[in-house]
Amino acid sequence: MKSPHDAASGKGEPRRTTGSSLLAGLFVGPVFFGLAAFLYWGPAGLDLPAGEAQGIDPALLDTGPLRHPIGDPPIIRINGYDRTCMDCHRLFPAADKPPAELMQHTHITLDHGINDRCRNCHDVQNRDRLVLHSGETIAFAEAVRLCAKCHGPTFHDWENGAHGRTNGFWDGARGAA
């Protein structure tokens, strides 16, 4: 005589369905159907609490760049006078390496990896300009080109809207990125 397990092992006839498994199959199907219907139409008279639609502050929808230059050239107010970088920096030559502790620019934290020299980004002759690897000087308004000289892949992602750029459209068919 063959056991019911012989069919599972490939020996003999296939296993026959017993009455209890048939009853379970007939019961489970309608239960799932009833549950699906209940979840689709929901209980009668169920009111979910809904508050007033919240408006979005238009300032949060600004699609312009997150960083804005402080002028081109940058202008800072010192002792009541508007000054550019060269107003002070024309008085002394650029150091090879910045001093360990700055007397001026104490608000600046230069924490940019191995880039610990002002001259890596600022033109030595004209501090009102930035400098690329080629020696070409660019305005502060073009600072993204400066980032591209060391961060090429990130810059290309940024240009295409994939790395933090928030101006324009992500879908080129809708407008400029």
Image: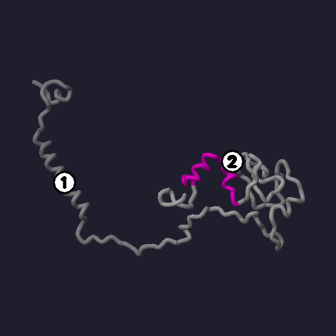
User: Left or right: where does residue 29 sit relative to residue 168?
Assistant: left
Q: Residue 142 colored magenta?
A: yes
Front-most of residues 7 and 69: 69
Determine whether the residue tagged by mark 2 lies in a helix, strand or loop: loop
Image coordinates for residue 88, horizontal then vertical, percent:
86, 62
Q: Tell me how many marks there are.
A: 2
Residue drawn at the location 42% of the way across and 73% of the way down: 53
Amino acid type, residue under disc 2 in the picture:
Lys
Front-most of residues 126 and 79: 126
Q: Which quadrant, please, contains the N terminus? A: top left
Q: Residue furthest right?
A: 91
Residue drawn at the location 70% of the way across and 47% of the way down: 113
**N-terminal-most mark, 1 or 2:** 1
Identify the disc placed on residue 11.
Answer: none
Residue drawn at the location 67% of the way across and 51% of the way down: 147
Identify the disc placed on residue 31.
Answer: 1
Q: Main secondary structure of the magenta part?
A: helix
Q: Quadrant of residue 44?
A: bottom left
Magenta segment: 141-163
Image coordinates for residue 93, horizontal then vertical, percent:
88, 54
Marks 1 and 2: which is nearer the front?
2
Is residue 77 shown above or below 113?
below
Residue drawn at the location 54% of the way across and 61% of the way down: 168
Q: Which quadrant, please, contains the C terminus? A: bottom right
Q: Which residue corresponds to mark 2?
A: 149
Image coordinates for residue 151, horizontal then vertical, percent:
65, 47
